Image (cartoon, rainbow, N blue to C red):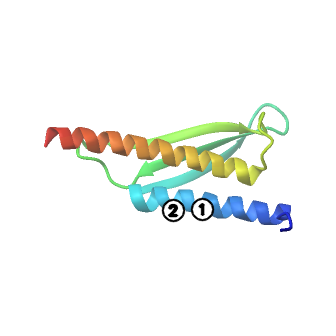
Amino acid sequence: MPRPTKTAMEEGFLRSLWGEMAEIEDEYKRLVMINILPTARKGVISVQMCATAIQSDENGIIRNDKIAQVYPNASSVSFAGFLWSMARRLCDQVANVEEERRGVLKGRG
């Protein structure tokens, strides 16, 4: 089987990024935003990804989970792969927070 082209690999990472963002939005009712900012170091950017709740929870709190990382970094992954990796970690973070919150609510009831 031939090796996938770099373009095909990038497209795969972008589809996976979209999938992670869609899961956060659909399953956890969050709005996902990605901010890309320049750093003081030439050629290095800071990427911030956050998932903000669309509605407040039972305590009136609007959840806003976020992660940030610089690119390029020690990993040798492409930028699309880097974004997918961040989205995967954000999705895990949101899932853990929601699971913990639901467990606390279940304990009260």
Foreground of the two, 81 or 54: 81
The quadrant of the picture occupied by the N terminus is: bottom right
The three-letter code of the residue at mark 2 reads: Ala
| Rendered image: mark on residue 80 | none
Q: Position of residue 13 (x, y in %)?
A: 70, 58
On screen, residue 59 versus residue 88, left or right, reads left
Residue at the (76%, 50%) spot, across then down = 79
Q: Which residue is mark 2?
A: 22
SS of the residue at dot 2?
Answer: helix
Taking the view exactly as shown, the residue that stands out farthest to the front is 1
SS of the residue under disc 1: helix
Q: Residue 18, labelled with which disc?
A: 1
At x 13% / y 43%, what residue is drawn? 109
- What is the distance, in whole Å, between disc 2 and disc 1 at their CAs? 6 Å
Q: Position of residue 26 (x, y in %)?
A: 43, 62
Residue 9 percent coordinates (x, y): 77, 61
**Spot occupied by residue 53 in the image (x, y as percentages of width and height):** 39, 51
- Tell me if 76 is positioned left or right of 15 in this view: right
Identity, as a three-letter code, of the amino acid under mark 1: Trp
| Mark 2–mark 1 CB contact (< 8 Å) | yes
Residue 72 in which image quadrant: top right
Residue 49 seen from this side: yes
Q: How many marks?
A: 2
At x 28%, y 45%, the residue is 102
